[in-house]
Image (tube, grey):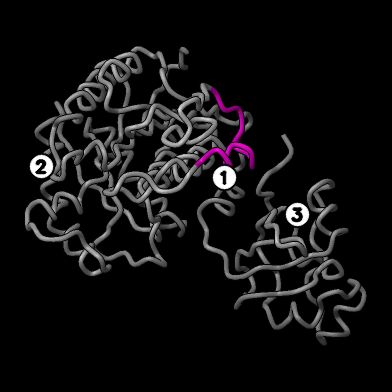
Amino acid sequence: MRLRSPRRVVIKVGSALVAPDGPPSDRYLGAIAAFVTTSRAAGREVVVVSSGAVAAGLAATGGRRPRTIPEKQALAAIGQPRLMALWGDLLDAPVAQVLLTHDDLVHRDRFLNARATMAELLARGVVPVVNENDTVAVDELKVGDNDNLAAHVAVLTEADLLVILSDVAGLYDADPRSYPDARLVPVVDRVDAAVRAMAGGAGTAGGTGGMRTKVQAAEKATARGIDTVLLDGTAATRLGALAEGVLQGTLFRALDPPMPARKHWLLHATPVAGRLTVDDGAARALRQSGASLLASGLVTVAGEVHRGDPVEVATESGEVFARGVSRYAAHELIRIQGRHSADVEAELGYAGPAAVIHRDDLVLVDPPA
């Protein structure tokens, strides 16, 4: 399959490729670095998102695998400079270490600062090597895996192509480790519930992802108009073919037109403060008619929601089908839930917004194709 020629590429390299035998090595990274060099020679800008800092730290210090957050953070701090040194030796270009946190992706000012820095690095002919700042991140403030981080970086840098490399050939219709007759899916036009169901659990012992996180990453990137490919990075011939624009893996096609930036941010970058459960009529109106959520359709409220907080919207059966920005705080929502709009002012003692969530501030999890 031939791909469109990209101008800017983000390539994610998983732990199974960085450290296949424990410590980081060039066993697979040599061919990956050659792909980066070939791409740059063809006039493309390349950003690398690299796993392996903890593995590098463990190799440098010995001992057992980390079990606690402080152990992982310490090993990441030890291993990150070693990982950068390896990439610096392999790439025929200056490299720059870029460590991002969840807050850099969620808060608009920090997002724009990170974007400006990345743009300047690329303009200077530098290859940014990106990782999550594991030394200071904690679970509740982490992106959590480098597949999803790579998707955020692709959006941040306005890339045309996201390449996710691991030790599997692509997306299969079943787990090939359990089902020998599983078939490779060459093209995914849209990530939906059926595609997510094909993804399994965690991957290799040294990684934090698996096919599930790769599909999540593809969904994030394609929603913003970025083609995404999954490829076996252990096969140098496949990397060589990809450098020529030929894919031997799975292509997730970019959505056309892409999701607007604000709705993409709301769906994919923001943590939610709570959940609003709505009745069947409200769910239909939101899904099928592009309506706003009114107080009359609200059934229950969960979480410490403040005005302006992102929230999940769910059916009474528990299916989360949308995200939106609440125009009321939780204590207000509880008082007005189920009430008609004309009664809201009388209940609260003051005039509030006409809608609990305005349709411009609401995005469906699985919009109609």
Q: Which mark is drawn over residue 261?
A: 1
Given the image, on which type of amino acid does mark 2 rest? Ala
Q: Which mark is drawn over residue 42?
A: none
Given the image, on which type of amino acid does mark 3 rest? Arg
Upstream in sequence: badge 1 or badge 3 = 1
The residue positioned 60% from the left and 27% from the top of the image is 189
Which stretch appears magenta?
187-199
> How far is the residue under mark 1 from the one under mark 3?
15 Å
Q: How many marks?
A: 3
Q: Residue 361, can we see it?
A: no
Task: List x then y, in percent, for residue 240.
Answer: 29, 15
Of 44 and 339, nearer the camera is 339
Task: List x then y, in percent, for residue 319.
Answer: 70, 57
Of 188 and 292, nearer the camera is 188
> How far is the residue under mark 1 from the one under mark 2?
35 Å
Tell whether label 3 touches label 1 (CB within 8 Å): no
- Neighbor class of circle 1 (other Cα within 10 Å; few <14, some 14-19, many 20+) is few
Please say if 330 is above or below 77. below
- View extreme (left): residue: 61
Given the image, on which type of amino acid does mark 1 rest? Ala
> How far is the residue under mark 3 from the one under mark 2?
49 Å
Secondary structure at numbered mark 1 = helix
